[in-house]
Amino acid sequence: MKFVADGMLGKLTRWLRILGYDVKYSNASDDAQLIAVARKERRILLTRDLELFKQATAKGIDASYLEGRTGEEKLAELAGRFGISLSIDMATSRCPKCNTKVKPIGKEKATDQVGKNTLVHYDEFWKCPSCKQIYWRGAHWIGIRKTLETARSSLDQAKE
Ligand SMILES: [Zn+2]
């Protein structure tokens, strides 16, 4: 399952990549380009633009119109429609910046790019082979888990 997201869904794009989904995103793409990418690469078009959604479905493109206001609501909508997983598996996680699969690296290889404090507190690191960004489950990880928990509970409510 691969996606292409419209320019209004930058934040959702990052979330889906962290969750391991392949998402193409450029805030410079116009409607025709988004539809062309969806068709050519067999990607599901994610949009907040009802006109674009109608245009795409009329052309036989698989598209999803997202109404959720918050990131949590949008994730719950997608989980309900496509059964996407709302938990992070670092083995399949992608770089939120550039969509490349991240790879685990040894702590010693993170020393150049990571602060001393971080090295003291964390042992597991991942690196994006493409943009070279290093990731670890730092303080922000609590926020990530909270967001996913909220998304899961709003999905459960929608099911009831
Ligand atoms: Zn990257």
Image: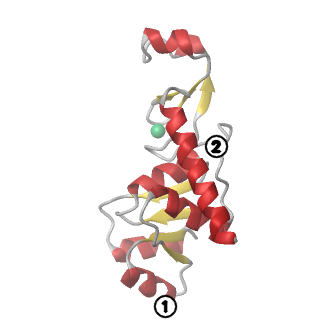
* Residue 116 percent location from the top left of the image: 44, 9
The residue that label 1 is drawn on is 58
Q: Which mark is residue 116?
A: none
Q: Residue at x 53, y 47 (%)?
A: 147
At mark 2, the secondary structure is loop
Image vertical order of residue 122 relative to residue 154, above or below = above
Q: CA distance from mark 1 to mark 2?
A: 34 Å
x, y percent for residue 45: 50, 71
Rendering coords of residue 40 (x, y %): 52, 72
Is residue 1 visible from the viewing direction of this image? no
Q: Amino acid at mark 2?
A: Ile
Colour mapping used in the image: secondary structure
Return the residue at label 2.
88
Could you say which is closer to the camera, residue 41 or residue 79?
Answer: 79
Amino acid under label 1?
Ala
Near mark 1 (Cα within 10 A), the count class, few <14, some 14-19 or many ≥20, is few
Whether residues under marks 1 and 2 lie with C-beta atoms below 8 angstroms apart, the answer is no
Circle 1 — which element?
helix
Query: Picture quarter containing residue 160?
Result: bottom right
Q: Earlier in the sequence, mark 1 or mark 2?
A: 1
